[in-house]
Amino acid sequence: MLNNDPNQVVSGASRADGLVSDKGSLHTGPFSLKKAFSSVVNAFDIEAVTTTWLWRSLKSRPATKERTIALIERAIVDVDDLISRQIDTILHAVSFQKIEASWRSLHYLVDTEAEYDEDLTIKIKILDVSWEELANDVSRAIEFDQSQTFHRLYSDEFDTPGGEPFGVMLGDYHVSHRPREGVFESDTEVLNNIAQIATAALCPFITNASYTLFGLDSYRELGQHPSLHDIFDQNEYIKWRSLRQQEDMRFVGLTLPNILMREPYRYDGTRSEGFIYQEQVNDADADFLWGSACYAFGGVLIRAFANTGWFADIRGGIHGFGEGGAVRNLSYARYEMDRKGIAARPSTNVQVHDFLERELSETGFIPLSSFHSTEHSVFYSNNSFHEPPQYESEIATLNAKLSSMIQYMLCVSRFGHFIKVMIRDKIGSFSTAADCQQFLQNWLNEYTTSSEGTSSELKARYPLAACKVEVHEQAGRLGYFTCVVHLQPHFQLDQLVSSIRLVTELAVGTTTGNNST
């Protein structure tokens, strides 16, 4: 909107001139644009401004054609530089970067779905809610199932005919153990509430870990500490360690570090803005556009489910029967001196080497590893935030560890969704718990094969190695059943000898959100 107030126009011109006063010719000196501008500013006549500036610039020396062209070309270069600096200021503003990174991350998910989901079985839904709003909702509710988040994830889907349970939640946040401004509850307490909702809805919550969680100023410092275990042994992490002991944390995953969402703009002839622009990157941490690694993990989940309808193959490198945790189609910036594009910068803002990857995994994180000078990133592990207990039996300890992995929570939850939805749609069909148990057992048997030499294709069709269902009537609650399901999936790269236990409540008249695993 234009403002014809002369005083305001002059003020604006002064600010613009001050922004670029270090430049010559067009901006400062005896033939500056400011002097030409000030003589006609009241009329707000751009043509007059240009004519006056050109006349004053040429009047001291003969106005030859060559000199006029050179002066105009130099002015165009200065204008391009002025516009470029303003665009850099906008693009590198923290608030703008957050918006751009979120939208580009969402675009990445949608593109991944379009590439792999030929049968259109995957749906992406968006809920625009800040961490502050989410924290206030789940923390102020008397019980977790009284929050709006619970109603969105559970009640609107499980309790509503035709509702479709969510498979996974991706939270575009960066959580830490320290209090944040504007939020009454700490991230630790908020995660505890979210984990209860995620467990009830059988829907893992995946978000990003902040570098401040490790007491760092940036992710680049992550590999410089001798031991991550020593960090979390400090007193300020007492609540954090206690939170990891809770079984609900098996439905929470914390990814890291950040991923590059866009290469810096280069003037390479592929764009046509009408001026020359090349993004100036002085600080890779501040000026590159970084997004949450949870979106990369979400892309892996989309690909795995689109290919097999299952989540077993979501970690490790590319192999003969799948792509594992390999991340496709990320952005990679090139080195300035690499004219031919031979070597690529890592797609993450820190390279996670083998030892660091193992430490991060052991301390409850899902790290994305990038290889040096290659366009290759991989999730080698997907441990949940839960710290599995240690037992005297090595086998029991191993099973507890595998049972806390996100991929197996996703697998078990998928069956849990079907069980709860089928029973919801068959309200009044079962007179006894035994009838319900037999129905569910027969259904699960259709997805089970115990053959050890089963091919990967057959395992995708029959994802369970063993299954067992127990349904009991609840004392004093007519029509309510407690359902205990023991599932043993075919495990990728693991030797799990026991099953994962899922406990859920089934109702004849209404459904409820009580689940445990």
Image (cartoon, grey):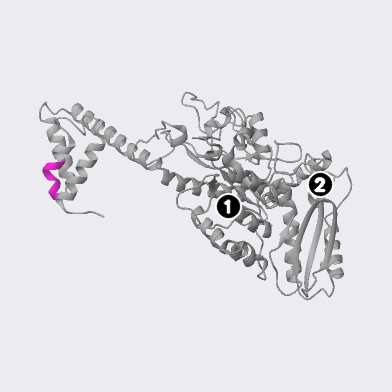
In the image, which residues are magenta? 37-43
Q: Are marks 1 and 2 in contact (CB under 8 Å)?
A: no
Q: Residues within 10 Å of mark 1 (few under 14, many from 20)?
A: some
* Residue highlighted by disc 2: 490
For the N terminus, which image quadrant?
Answer: bottom left
Image quadrant in which you'd find residue 454: top right
* Picture quadrant of residue 240: top right
Foreground label between 1 and 2: 1
Q: Nearer the viewer, residue 248 or 59?
A: 248
The residue drawn where x is 37% and y is 38% is 88
Q: Which residue is mark 1?
A: 189
Residue 340: x %, y % from top left: 51, 25
Q: Is 204 left, or right, of 26 in this rendering?
A: right
Q: Amino acid at mark 2?
A: His
For the question of whether residue 264 can be seen, the reply is no
Q: Residues within 10 Å of mark 2 (few under 14, many from 20)?
A: many
**Camera-nearest residue between 291 and 374:** 291
Q: Residue at x 85, y 55 (%)?
A: 467
Q: Is residue 326 left or right of residue 4?
A: right
Task: Tell me which secondary structure the magenta stretch mostly adopts.
Answer: helix
Q: Which corner quadrant holds the C terminus?
A: bottom right
Q: Is residue 252 visible?
A: yes
Mark 1 or 2 closer to N-term?
1
